[in-house]
Amino acid sequence: MRLLALALALPVAAWAQSQDWLPKQQAELQLLDKVTARVSVLRAPVGQATQFGTLTIRVAACNARPPDEVPDAAAFLEVSDSRRAAGFQEVFRGWMFANAPGVSMLEHPVYDLRVLDCK
């Protein structure tokens, strides 16, 4: 299991060092409220906190591939939920990829979140 975790971590580390990605200033996120079945698209500026329901979403970085390559986007997100107890509010912290949403996802009983693009 440790070997698998290491094998998965290496491509992410290599990706983070890659010069092929372009830093952008805004993440386009898709959110689903599972209770109401409402889907929303949210534009979140890098470095600022954005609210959606009980979630606070902070985009620390948002990168996109150059126009001459296969389109993709990745964002480093920090997500917290105000309904959780103090000290345990963070529900997600890490990279999310537009073309591979299943690699790293928010596991929340009420909300689904995915990265659509970086602009």
Image (tube, rainbow, N blue to C red):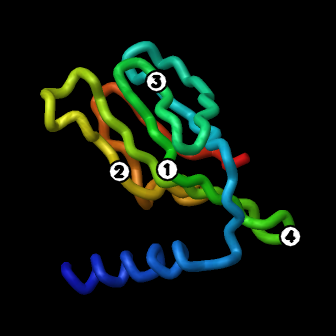
Q: Is 85 in front, or is 113?
A: 85
Disc sitting over residue 18 in the figure? none
CA–CA distance between discs 3 and 4? 34 Å
Identify the amino acid type marked 1: Ala
Q: Which residue is drawn at the image coordinates 67% and 59% (left, top)?
A: 23
Identify the amino acid type marked 4: Asp
Sequence-wise, which precedes: disc 3 or disc 1?
3
| Residue identifier under label 3 | 51
User: Could you tell me residue 78's position as x and y percent?
Assistant: 39, 45
| Residue identifier under label 2 | 93
CA–CA distance between discs 2 and 3? 16 Å
73 versus 115 height, above or below: below
Sequence-wise, which precedes: disc 2 or disc 3?
3
Identify the amino acid type marked 2: Arg
| Residue identifier under label 1 | 60
CA–CA distance between discs 3 and 1? 15 Å
User: Could you tell me residue 81's position as x and y percent?
Assistant: 29, 29
* Label 4 packing within 10 angstroms: few (<14), some (14-19), many (20+): few
Image quarter hosting the N terminus: bottom left
CA–CA distance between discs 4 and 1? 25 Å
Sequence-wise, which precedes: disc 2 or disc 4?
4
| Residue identifier under label 4 | 68
- Could you tell me if the residues under marks 4 and 1 are in contact, i.e. CB atoms within 8 Å? no
Determine the secondary structure under disc 3.
Answer: strand
Describe residue 52's horizontal placement relative to residue 74 as left or right: left
* Label 2 packing within 10 angstroms: few (<14), some (14-19), many (20+): some
* Label 1 packing within 10 angstroms: few (<14), some (14-19), many (20+): some
Determine the secondary structure under disc 1.
Answer: strand
